[in-house]
């Protein structure tokens, strides 16, 4: 379960951000997790809850936004998205050459501190 190490680095980042700005605790954090990132939101949430105790983020509420996959076809130029966790080909021309625009991210979008 690699979500444990992801939750740990997430915690390190938000605690560091909190301390750097002179605040004493993190009350909420929002992250964008792409469907193709391989991260299971439930497992991430569970790990975060388990690891946050004894940190400045012990009371932090984690909100996870699920980001759908978006890709740009390198062959026909059309942009497409899918609710699935994988993309194998362009739905318009069946080309398997495309550029991922979103869906692989793990970004902290918001940190609320006190
Ligand atoms: Zn295409």
Image (tube, grey):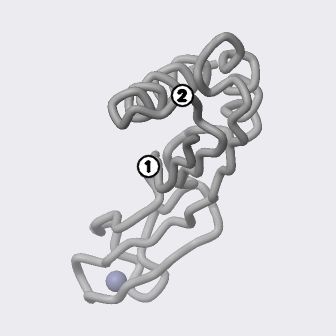
Q: Nearer the viewer, residue 63 or 25?
A: 25
Question: Mark 1 or mark 2, which has the lower sequence index?
Answer: 2
User: Whole-percent x and y of residue 68?
Assistant: 56, 66
Which quadrant is home to the C terminus?
top right
Question: In the structure shown, which secondary structural element does the residue marked by tag 1 occupy?
Answer: strand
Question: In the structure shown, which secondary structural element does the residue marked by tag 2 occupy?
Answer: loop
Q: Nearer the viewer, residue 39 or 10?
A: 10
User: Whole-percent x and y of residue 14?
Assistant: 47, 33
Residue sitting at 73 percent across and 30 percent down? 59
Q: Is residue 62 left or right of residue 114?
A: right
Give the Cα separation between the discs numbered 1 and 2.
22 Å
Ligand 1 location (quadrant): bottom left
Q: Residue furthest top?
A: 54
Residue sitting at 44 percent across and 72 percent down? 70
User: Whole-percent x and y of residue 79?
Assistant: 38, 84
Which residue is tagged 1? 107
Which residue is tagged 2? 24
Q: Is residue 5 left or right of residue 49?
A: left
State whether residue 75 is above or below residue 47: below
Residue sitting at 62 percent across and 27 percent down? 57
State whether residue 93 is above or below residue 58: below
Mark 2 surroundings within 10 Å by alpha-carbon count, few (fewer than 14), some (14 through 19), many (20 or more): few
In this rendering, the count of numbered labels is 2
Mark 1 surroundings within 10 Å by alpha-carbon count, few (fewer than 14), some (14 through 19), many (20 or more): some
Q: Quadrant of residue 76?
A: bottom left
State whether residue 7 is above or below residue 45: above
Does the CB distance between marks 1 and 2 fall below 8 Å?
Answer: no
Residue sitting at 49 percent across and 45 percent down? 37
State whether residue 12 is above or below residue 45: above
Q: Is residue 13 left or right of residue 83?
A: left
Which quadrant is home to the N terminus?
top right
Q: Nearer the viewer, residue 72 or 44?
A: 44
């Amino acid at each position: 379960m690699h979500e444990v190490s992801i939750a740990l680095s997430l915690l390190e980042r938000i605690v560091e951000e909190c301390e750097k700005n002179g605040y004493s605790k993190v009350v909420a954090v929002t992250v964008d997790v792409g469907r193709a990132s391989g991260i299971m939101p439930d497992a991430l949430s569970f790990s975060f809850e388990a690891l946050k105790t004894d940190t400045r983020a012990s009371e932090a509420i984690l909100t996870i936004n699920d980001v759908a996959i978006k890709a740009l076809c390198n062959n026909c130029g059309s942009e497409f998205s899918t609710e699935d966790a994988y993309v194998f080909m362009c739905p318009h021309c069946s080309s398997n050459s495309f550029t991922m625009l979103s869906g692989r991210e793990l970004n902290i979008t918001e940190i609320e501190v006190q």
